[in-house]
Image (cartoon, rainbow, N blue to C red):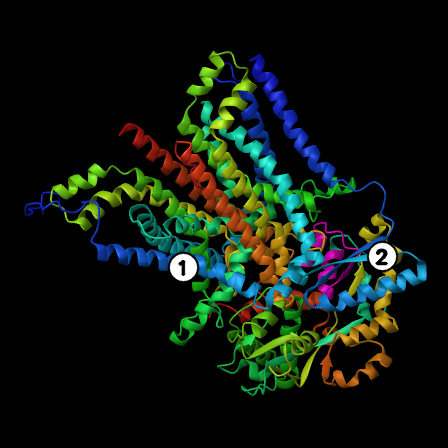
């Protein structure tokens, strides 16, 4: 019994030691590192964009303040990324696919509810839209949204439940139908027709692009304009064509500083400068080079050829903002669920 | 433990059990408790609603269905492979024997991209199947294929030792009584192997049910069609729906643990039978 | 059933435990074809795609800084997890095989539990515990302790997923061996620690090593659970399997498969180590370590 008691104590000590070891690894380093460090948590298609932005901003910041800054990146489906930030991933800035995801972070108390009014243009330094990527020569003759619902067409889009881009896809199709055919019943029909033609739902925009481009599945990919241009540029202009529908949605991917994190890590100045940099001439130029539509009129003019004009509607005018669109379309039992209900 | 008497002549009962329990407590019981706590904060009605939603039911069906189908394939081929490896001599046998464990050792993400690369329309196998109108990648069949890979070693490894230790006299007696070879195998050998094979099947089933890494690459991930339960949990999390994720996870976990408990009961019975008989 | 009338037994010129040669060859061919389809081809395709752009591209992919950071993190995780699970495996096997106590069956089931928990659920469990909205998350974060989205979280979920591997190897082995030699050592005046280090440990060393090898392979290769708690910060919280996924998502297929070959090699090394241990154990007499 004596032996037993001391054994229990010893075993307690042992496991205590193990957990102390883990804690030691977990504890933050005492002194803050000299160079500033930012974590930018972003969505799928912005990998290449931010690689270049980060390098340019680091140069700019060093020149202006003498401090070097290292920016770390994390990419994934917008929902997954926002979820990680809510669960404690220490993002200084978030650059996500849609305002709804940043709203969710704000709802968790990590940044001010009115974050979207803190930066110009709804906190969206660049915009994009949804276009069609088709096989070279457009063999199936896909011209507009109605064609996507034709029998025998295979449509690739990510899952709107997890991908911000895919939500824009759904809303673009709906908005088109309401405008063109003038009734929600028609819009519902179009949505049902399109999703009847969808063989695979990847969780993120990147997964869908790979499915379409690399695996050769599907006749048309609903994609961000920038993602489509990138795919054509990277993987061969001889393989794909981009088709612009008659009407599409103005997609506004927002950016924000995460108050709770920058205040704790004392990185607010550099984090804010980083986002401001996106609005500046150099940032806007990089944005345009990566196929996002710049906000600056001057830069837009320089790249006019790359961004043909098409009729774009905004989420506010068509759906009354993200919160309402989210609840109506993507909540359980919403329009999207009805469109994909078991065939 | 409150041990009032010594459990045996050996030392270290308190130390080993104490450490085992603290480790298990911290690493397994505490997280389970968090899950139960979270799930219990839902009303039964809400819980039922989350779990019985058509999409969740479809995901459960696919996960259980594909795992069962894969386990069936693995039962058949596992018996065959174990038999061939134990009974026959052929060049490269040792190498093949070693390779059987590959699915244990290969990270699931690697298995996922490899299987996808093989079975999609441009893959080595997918391209050959396409003219026949058989599509594997991005269908339910693809899910089953991934689970066959993942569960392949279990039946082989549970059956092999039984086969090795089988008394030759049994078969010889059957043969000398005039039974044809296939009769001997069916009536004498197979019944001896079945309990072990059963254990293997349930292990493969348990592994297949929870598998994520290899499946998400090869499944189409279409809600209600090719979406497995673990992916649905992941998606619920990404929708900020922790309640939904928790409810589905708790249900799924309970089912898997029941399965595991069944295996342990089975092997315990088997052990007792062996001890008695 | 067995009372069927039968002709006199055929002349005993062939082994009654063997099948006709034709049947034998068909069975071998079937089994090998199945294994080739499900084992060799997937392995082959990884190497084929990894090397499709030549050795230089391969070398570039595996020596790029993010890949190296992933290797480092993966090694760190294994270095934390394997020793912890080794200790646990020893303690659990000792307690379960050397003593009788109430609730032992339950304990064995609990040890196995992580096997039947989906990796995704494993990740979720730790989010519920340490997430910013979890049980302990807020309290810890106020004190500047970060578990999720950094090394400790990754190590914790990995430890959970690989927990049973060493114990599973040891329990049947120690059960089969019995405790006579230990008791003899004690009778001869050995202290408990001497007995453990000189008698018990050497007796199970091959099984133990095999468990460690397997645990290590799984710790380095875990994907689903780690994916939930990693945060995917490049160069910081990306383990090798996550790095494969990221490259895959960046259209860098060749690079993805190149990095995947590292993990495949890890798997093959594991198999080789296992075969070696098996052979060693058999050579020294006694049965080889049971396999997973």
- Residue A8 appears in the picture as rendered: yes
Q: Residues within 10 Å of mark 1 (few under 14, many from 20)?
A: some
Mark 2 and mark 1 residues within 8 Å of each other at the beta carbon: no
- Which quadrant is home to the N terminus of chain C? top left
Q: Secondary structure at mark 1?
A: helix
Front-lying residue, C35 or A113: C35
Q: Is residue C2 magenta?
A: no
| Residue A69, numbered label | 2
Does C259 appear above or below C277? below
The total of numbered circles placed on residues is 2
Q: Is residue C59 left or right of residue A118?
A: left
Start-end of magenta stretch: A81-106
Disc 2 with disc 1 on a shared chain = no
- Residue A160 appears in the picture as rendered: no
Q: Is residue A310 left or right of residue A264?
A: left
Q: Which residue is mark 1?
A: C36
Q: Secondary structure at mark 2?
A: strand
- Which quadrant is home to the C terminus of chain C? top left
Front-lying residue, B212 or B163: B163
Alpha carbons under labels 2 and 1: distance apart:
51 Å
């Amino acid at each position: 019994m004596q032996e037993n008691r001391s054994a229990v104590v010893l075993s307690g000590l042992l496991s205590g030691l193990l957990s102390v070891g883990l804690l030691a690894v977990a504890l933050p380093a005492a002194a803050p590192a000299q160079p500033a460090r930012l974590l930018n948590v972003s969505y799928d298609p912005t990998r290449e964009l931010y690689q270049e932005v980060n390098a340019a901003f680091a140069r700019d910041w060093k020149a202006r303040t003498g401090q070097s800054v290292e920016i770390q990146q994390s990419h994934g489906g917008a929902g997954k990324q926002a979820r990680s930030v809510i669960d404690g991933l220490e993002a200084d800035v978030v650059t996500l696919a849609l305002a709804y995801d940043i709203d969710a972070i704000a709802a968790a108390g990590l940044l001010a509810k009115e974050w979207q009014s803190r930066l110009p243009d709804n906190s969206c330094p660049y915009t994009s839209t949804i276009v069609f990527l088709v096989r070279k020569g457009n063999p199936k003759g896909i011209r507009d949204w109605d064609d996507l619902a034709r029998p025998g067409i295979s449509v690739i889009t990510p899952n709107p439940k997890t991908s911000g881009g895919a939500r824009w896809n759904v809303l673009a199709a709906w908005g088109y139908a309401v405008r063109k055919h003038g009734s929600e019943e028609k819009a519902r029909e179009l949505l049902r027709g399109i999703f009847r033609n969808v063989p695979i739902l990847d969780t993120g925009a990147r997964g869908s692009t790979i499915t379409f481009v690399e695996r050769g599945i599907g006749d048309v990919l609903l994609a961000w304009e920038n993602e489509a241009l990138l795919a054509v540029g990277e993987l061969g202009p001889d393989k794909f064509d981009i088709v612009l529908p008659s009407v599409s949605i103005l997609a506004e991917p927002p950016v924000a500083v995460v108050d709770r994190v920058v205040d704790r890590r004392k990185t607010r100045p550099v984090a804010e400068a980083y986002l401001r940099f996106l609005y500046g001439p150099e940032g806007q130029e990089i944005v345009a080079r990566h196929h996002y539509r710049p906000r600056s009129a001057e830069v837009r003019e320089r790249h006019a050829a790359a961004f043909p004009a098409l009729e774009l509607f905004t989420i506010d005018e068509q759906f009354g903002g993200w919160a309402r669109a989210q609840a109506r379309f993507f909540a359980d039992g919403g329009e999207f669920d009805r469109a994909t209900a078991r065939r | 433990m409150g041990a009032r008497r010594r459990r045996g002549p050996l030392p270290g009962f308190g130390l080993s059990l104490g450490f085992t329990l603290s480790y298990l407590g911290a690493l397994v019981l505490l997280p389970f408790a968090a899950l139960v706590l979270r799930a219990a904060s839902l009303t039964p009605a809400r819980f039922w609603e989350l779990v019985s939603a058509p999409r969740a039911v479809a995901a459960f069906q696919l996960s259980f269905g594909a795992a069962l189908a894969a386990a069936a394939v693995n039962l058949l081929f596992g018996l065959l492979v174990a038999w061939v490896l134990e009974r026959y001599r052929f060049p490269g046998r040792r190498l093949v024997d070693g390779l059987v464990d590959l699915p244990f050792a290969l990270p699931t993400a690697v298995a996922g991209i490899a299987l996808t690369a093989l079975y999609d329309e441009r893959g080595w196998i997918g391209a050959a199947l396409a003219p026949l109108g058989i599509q594997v990648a991005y269908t339910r069949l693809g899910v089953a294929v991934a689970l066959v890979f993942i569960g392949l070693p279990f039946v082989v490894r549970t059956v092999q030792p039984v086969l090795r230790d089988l008394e030759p006299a049994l078969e010889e007696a059957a043969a000398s009584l005039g039974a044809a070879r296939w009769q001997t195998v069916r009536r004498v050998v197979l019944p001896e192997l079945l309990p072990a094979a059963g254990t293997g099947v349930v292990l493969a089933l348990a592994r297949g049910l929870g598998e994520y890494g290899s499946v998400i690459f090869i499944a189409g991930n279409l809600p209600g069609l090719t979406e497995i339960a673990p992916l649905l949990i992941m998606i619920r999390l990404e929708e900020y729906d922790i309640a939904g994720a928790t409810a589905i996870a708790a249900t799924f976990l309970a089912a898997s643990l029941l399965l595991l408990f069944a295996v342990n009961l089975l092997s315990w019975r088997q052990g007792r039978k062996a001890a008695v008989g | 059933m067995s009372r069927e009338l039968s002709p006199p037994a055929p002349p005993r010129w062939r082994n009654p435990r063997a099948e006709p040669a034709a049947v034998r060859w068909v069975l071998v061919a079937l089994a090998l074809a199945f294994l080739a389809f499900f084992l060799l081809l997937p392995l082959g395709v990884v190497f084929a795609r990894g090397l499709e752009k030549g050795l230089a591209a391969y070398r570039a992919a595996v020596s790029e800084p993010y890949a190296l950071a992933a290797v480092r993190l993966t090694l760190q995780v294994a270095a934390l997890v394997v020793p912890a699970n080794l200790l646990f495996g020893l303690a659990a096997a000792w307690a379960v095989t050397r003593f009788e106590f109430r609730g032992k069956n339950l304990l064995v089931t609990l040890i196995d539990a992580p096997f039947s928990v989906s990796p995704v659920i494993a990740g979720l469990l730790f989010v519920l515990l340490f997430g910013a909205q979890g049980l302990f998350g807020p309290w810890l974060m106020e004190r500047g302790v970060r578990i999720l989205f950094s090394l400790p979280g990754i190590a914790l979920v990995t430890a959970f997923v690989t927990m049973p591997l060493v114990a599973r190897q040891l329990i049947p082995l120690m059960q089969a061996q019995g405790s006579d030699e230990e008791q003899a050592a004690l009778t001869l005046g050995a202290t408990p620690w001497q007995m453990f280090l000189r008698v018990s440990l050497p007796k199970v060393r091959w099984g133990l090593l095999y468990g460690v090898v397997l645990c290590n392979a799984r710790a380095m290769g875990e994907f689903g659970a780690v994916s939930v708690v990693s945060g995917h910060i490049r160069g910081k919280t990306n383990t090798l399997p996550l790095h494969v996924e990221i490259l895959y998502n960046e259209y860098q297929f060749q690079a993805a498969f190149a990095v995947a070959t590292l993990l495949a090699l890890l798997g093959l090394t594991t198999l080789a180590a296992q075969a070696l241990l098996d052979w060693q154990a058999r050579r020294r007499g006694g049965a080889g370590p049971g396999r997973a």
